[in-house]
Amino acid sequence: MTRSPLIALTASCEGDMDLSVCSGCTACSLRCAKGVPATREEWQSICDAIAAMPLKEHAHLQSVLAQNKRVDLGDEVSVEMCRYWDTANEGCAVYSARPLICRLLGHVEWLPCPIEKVTRIVPTEKALALMKAYAKEERHTFEEWESLTNEA
Ligand code: SF4
Ligand code: SF4
């Protein structure tokens, strides 16, 4: 299948990232709060990834979706996390298909890594071109896409 220019640009920006430093790190996980926007293509990617999951991974996803997503931050403050955030094991259940915003976190100038572990970010000009293209897309939260398309 031909990739859209946006997906190709996203992949190109990912080529500039050093994702190895993020392996096993959850220090920016609070950014996985509910309400992340996704384009139709990103939503479809998540649905396709879920449809292609082996049984065990699919069962894990179902348990993640069933979790209480409210995380207590103390001092009577709490946050509702993304439906795909595994609150028990800390991780994204659809990591390989996560939307652009999730991919850029910590790797662009305006969304820096909170623990300053990421030293190689996407060149700002390139990242801004990506955001400009992205801004033209119709975007909704996962919950909105679900009710619009009745999937995942
Ligand atoms: S962006 Fe920073 S805090 Fe977030 S996972 Fe990567 S290294 Fe950890
Ligand atoms: S899709 Fe994954 S990476 Fe993105 S906000 Fe949800 S849990 Fe976090």
Image (cartoon, rainbow, N blue to C red):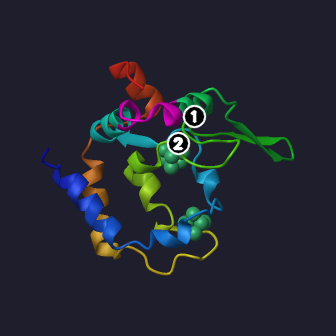
At 58% across and 29% down in the image, what residue appears?
A: 65
Task: Give the x, y percent position of residue 34.
Answer: 56, 39
Q: Amino acid at mark 2?
A: Ala
Task: Give the x, y percent position of residue 11.
Answer: 28, 61
Which residue position holds label 1? Answer: 60
At 24% across and 53% down in the image, what residue appears?
A: 7
Instruction: Point out the residue furthest to the left here.
Output: 2
At 59% across and 44% down in the image, what residue appears?
A: 33
Which residue position holds label 2? Answer: 93
Q: Earlier in the sequence, mark 2 or mark 1?
A: 1
| 79 inside magenta stretch | no
Q: Amino acid at mark 1?
A: His
- Would the CB of label 2 be found within 8 Å of ligand 2? yes
Mark 2 or mark 1, which is nearer to you?
Answer: 1
User: SS for tag 1?
Assistant: helix
Q: Which image quadrant: the N terminus?
A: top left
**Vertical placement of residue 40 versus 5, above or below:** above
| Magenta stretch in the rendered image | 49-58
Tell me the CA gap for discs 2 and 1.
8 Å
**Vertical placement of residue 85 versus 121, above or below:** above
